[in-house]
Image: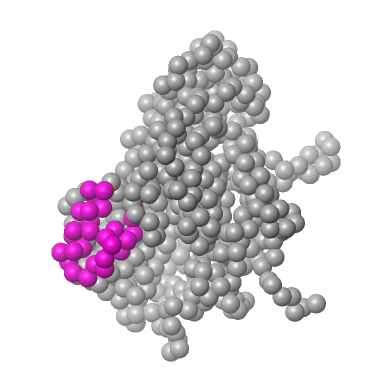
């Protein structure tokens, strides 16, 4: 706890600027020589007593909004949630006592910090060629205070452990990080037998991993690893790669102890009724990504119909096993609407040109499979989404756990912004806005095993909060860093409103606008260095339509 200065009582408006000097972060070695993450200079606090006044709370449990309240933070904890009356009838005698720091948040909603259950922390060493600091700040600027990293491919666990440690000590601007290394990256040699698989799991545990993320593996290797993970207490999740679903669909892997799944591969295959494997074209080659993603968009229609006996049988089995779905709808959104995603409003100011290079159609960059993407592909994917969303919504309705994961850094899906898109996609799937927020907060914390500390606005919990002006239950678009448009009827002018106002982690209050401004400045500098004008970046090198 930093030594408190004299009382910093500020009676601030709802859009108050936090002008106090940020608490100093202890110096620490860079997480990577090639990609240093700067010591933290942003953020206010934590203090012994911070009062957030006049807030409306959405607590993350699924309960409706409640307020007005004064919330008291003490250090890194929520110390008090004090009702101060009713809307339009505040009782000044019921207010929380003065604090060392106060913000008047009239008109603002407070939510638990968001949990992203599927991320990859990319760096200058990856094909995306982005500084890790850029990614971390985009997450925090969009309200994400906890992430589950499911594989920073090619780098040892220790690289991410160092960043996790620095985040835990708030030496850098970053969310909390749970580390789930990819199973095939744990050892520096191939894993081809059950005993080596068990050794790899024990090695991950010894080195500090929180869990393991599987993609494939031979059948005996995969199931030995899942068994060992259960024994040593490591959580598990899996992207069921097409190479293994013939013997490892979601019914089979969950029966062997898998805790959760990423995306949706392995789920429709468990509901095939008149075939054993996906019906691929005869010229199909899995390494051709347009073929792979194109055919993926034609998979759900090969499975049992929604509501059918096989559909319900699979769902009931997963529910009995307390299985967790991390659908990552946003990861595939470009497949059903390339124009919408490639021209999303935030790309102009928040996407680095180096990342844009990765997004461009490429035979070698993963997720850049737009070699000759067609209307037929997009129509197939729209149907794919309809069936997929139906299953996820039904699963939630029957008591299953669904989390919010973004899988950003691929397929025109930008860090932070993609997370908010995932919230909207869950709403499209049939979740109510309150159910969406529950999935983003309490359900995510439960899936990571941190619901005793995170995921709800509750006395005693960690002071990880999202503060937004306006009502996100009525309009999730208010959470986008670029906000949303609104006509001011008094002036007749169109205004851009919204955007997360403050992100609070461990009681440290970050001005989310300032974090987004830092990212915009970084993008503008790289554009200037490359002589790229402000505004949209081109995808094509040659335009044959002119």
Query: Which of these two is toward me, 431 or 97?
Result: 97
In depth, the one of 356 and 457 nearer the eye is 356
Q: Residue at x 51, y 69 (%)?
A: 365
Does residue 323 appear to the left or right of 520 in the view shown?
left
- Residue 204: percent from the left, percent from the top? 26, 53
Q: Residue at x 72, y 46 (%)?
A: 485
- Where does residue 333 sit, x and y in percent of width and height? 55, 63
**Residue 425 image offset from top left, x and y in percent:** 53, 56
Q: Give the answer, above or below, for where 267 lies relative to 433.
A: below
Front residue of 404 and 383: 404
Q: Quadrant of the N terminus?
A: top left
Q: Give the residue at the far front of this rendering.
A: 33
Residue 437 lies in magenta, yes or no? no
Q: Quadrant of the C terminus?
A: bottom right
Q: Would residue 44 be seen by someone viewing this image from the given angle?
A: yes
Report the residue at 20% width, 53% height from top. 202
Which residue extends farthest bottom?
A: 282
Q: Can residue 95 be seen in this snapshot? A: no
- The x and y percentages for residue 81 are 46, 23
Range shown magenta: 178-207
> In the image, 293: left or right of 339?
left
């Amino acid at each position: 706890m930093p030594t408190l200065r004299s009382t910093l009582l500020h009676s601030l408006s709802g859009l108050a600027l936090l002008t106090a000097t940020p608490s100093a972060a202890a110096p620490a070695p860079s997480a990577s020589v090639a990609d240093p993450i700067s010591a933290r200079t942003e953020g206010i606090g934590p203090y012994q007593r911070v009062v957030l006044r006049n807030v409306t709370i959405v607590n993350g449990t699924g309960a409706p909004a409640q307020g007005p309240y004064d919330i008291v933070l003490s250090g890194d904890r929520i110390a008090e949630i004090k009702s101060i009356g009713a809307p339009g009838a505040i009782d000044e005698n019921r207010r929380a006592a003065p604090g060392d720091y106060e913000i008047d948040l009239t008109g603002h909603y407070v939510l638990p910090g968001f949990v992203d259950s599927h991320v990859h922390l990319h760096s200058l060493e990856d094909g995306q060629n982005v500084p890790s600091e850029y990614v971390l700040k985009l997450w925090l600027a969009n309200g994400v205070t906890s992430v589950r990293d499911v594989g920073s491919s090619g780098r040892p666990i220790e690289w991410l452990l160092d960043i996790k440690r620095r985040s835990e000590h708030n030496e850098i601007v970053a969310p909390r990080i749970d580390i789930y290394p990819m199973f095939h990256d744990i050892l520096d040699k191939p894993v081809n037998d059950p005993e080596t698989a068990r050794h790899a799991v024990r090695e991950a545990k010894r080195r500090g991993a929180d869990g393991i993320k599987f993609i494939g593996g031979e059948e005996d290797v995969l199931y030995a690893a899942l068994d060992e993970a259960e024994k040593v207490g490591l959580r598990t999740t899996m992207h069921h790669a097409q190479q293994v679903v013939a013997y490892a669909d979601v019914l089979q892997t969950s029966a062997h102890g898998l805790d959760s799944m990423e995306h949706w591969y392995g789920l429709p295959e468990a509901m095939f009724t008149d075939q054993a494997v996906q019906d691929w074209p005869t010229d199909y080659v899995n390494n051709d990504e347009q073929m792979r993603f194109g055919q993926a968009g034609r998979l759900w229609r090969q499975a049992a119909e929604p509501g059918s006996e096989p559909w319900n049988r699979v769902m009931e089995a997963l529910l009995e096993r307390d299985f967790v779905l991390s659908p990552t709808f946003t990861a595939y959104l470009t497949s059903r609407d390339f124009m919408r995603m490639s021209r999303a409003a935030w790309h102009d100011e928040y996407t680095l040109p180096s990342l844009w290079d990765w997004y461009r159609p490429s035979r070698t960059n993963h997720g850049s499979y737009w070699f000759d993407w067609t209307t037929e592909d997009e129509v197939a994917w729209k149907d794919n989404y309809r069936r997929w969303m139906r299953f996820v919504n039904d699963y939630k309705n029957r008591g299953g756990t669904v989390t919010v994961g973004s899988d950003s850094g691929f397929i025109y899906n930008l860090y932070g912004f993609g997370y908010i898109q995932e919230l909207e996609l869950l709403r499209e799937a049939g979740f109510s806005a309150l159910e969406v927020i529950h999935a983003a907060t309490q359900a995510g914390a439960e899936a990571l095993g941190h619901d005793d500390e995170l995921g709800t606005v509750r006395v005693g919990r960690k002071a990880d909060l999202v503060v937004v002006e306006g009502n996100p239950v009525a309009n999730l678009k208010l959470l986008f860093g670029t906000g949303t448009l609104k006509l001011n009827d008094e002036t007749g002018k169109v205004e851009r409103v919204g955007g997360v106002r403050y992100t609070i982690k461990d009681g440290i209050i970050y001005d989310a606008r300032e974090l987004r401004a830092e990212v915009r400045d970084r993008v503008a500098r790289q554009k200037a260095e490359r002589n790229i004008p402000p505004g949209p970046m081109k995808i094509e090198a040659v335009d044959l339509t002119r």
